Image (cartoon, rainbow, N blue to C red):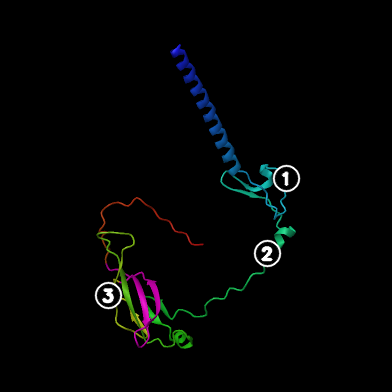
Amino acid sequence: MEQNRNKLNSRSINYWLKILLLLFFTASIFILGLQNVNFPSTNFVLSFTSRSEDAFLVYTSACKIPKVDPFAPSVKKLLKPGTVLRCDPDVDIVYQKDNKLVVNRTAVNESRRYKDLSYCKYKTIWRPLEKPTSHDYFRYINESEAFTSDIKLRSEDEFVRLNCYEKDDTSIYTNFFAFVQRKDRVEKDAIKFIKNILKIGMNA
């Protein structure tokens, strides 16, 4: 008698477990379905009344863009006249020419911001390629002599940071430059391991 009662209890528990699992999966599917439903906004005049693919400009699992009439009155009120982009009238007061840094004295004299410029110096940006510790690790080394018109870079200087100062040594201008220096001999790569990453850059 006791054994039959245990069997009935076991069957009852299994039955309710199956019901609960079924309800759980049904609710999960329902919630996931709600997240993917696109409700048309009342702010726009949409050119569709159904959920067919023809009603969308883009219809993928990751992105759905509805077809909206760009000339509809509800869209037109969102458009505003563009504003004129006003760029800083100041030009670079130091520029690079061949392997030189040249102070643009005309720009300095015409600039209100840099009119008190007295002299400039640059430092080499150095990274230890022999023992790379971090991709972000670098140091500024070998500060140059002060110059007021132009300066020829050393042959080993490829990447530099420039600072220009007032008479009281206050820094008023900073810029960075990259140079392609002519080398008399080919340098051997100190890093022996073979790189397995190919980087391709495109500028448009």
Q: CA distance from mark 1 to mark 3?
A: 70 Å
Q: Residue furthest right?
A: 73
At label 1, counting other C-alpha atoms closer than 10 Å, the crowd grade (few under 14, some 14-19, many 20 or more) is few
Query: What kind of residue is marked 1?
Result: Thr
- Residue labelled with disc 1: 49
Residue 94 position (above or below residue 62): below
Q: Nearer the viewer, residue 30 or 52?
A: 30
Image x and y of residue 106, in percent: 46, 86
Task: Select label 1 or label 3 by which is in front.
Answer: 1
Q: Which mark is residue 79?
A: 2
Which tag, 2 or 1, sits closer to the chain's start?
A: 1
The residue under the point 67% across, 69% down is 81
Q: Residue at x 46, y 88 (%)?
A: 109
| Badge 2: residue crowd in 10 Å (few <14, some 14–19, many ≥20) | few
Q: Which residue is mark 3?
A: 142
Look at 44% across and 58% down and name the residue there: 201
Q: Is label 1 in a helix, a strand or a loop? A: loop
Residue span colored magenta = 157-184
Locate residue 13, reporting x and y percent: 49, 23
Give the alpha-carbon distance from disc 2 to disc 1, as whole Å: 25 Å
Which kind of residue does numbered mark 3 sit on? Answer: Asn
Residue toward you, 198 or 52? 52
Left or right of residue 151: residue 1: right
Between discs 3 and 2, the one toward the N terminus: 2
Judging from the image, what secondary structure is the residue with disc 3 in? loop
Left or right: 72, with 129 as reference point: right
The extreme front residue here reads 1
**Marks 1 and 3, the one that precedes in the sequence:** 1
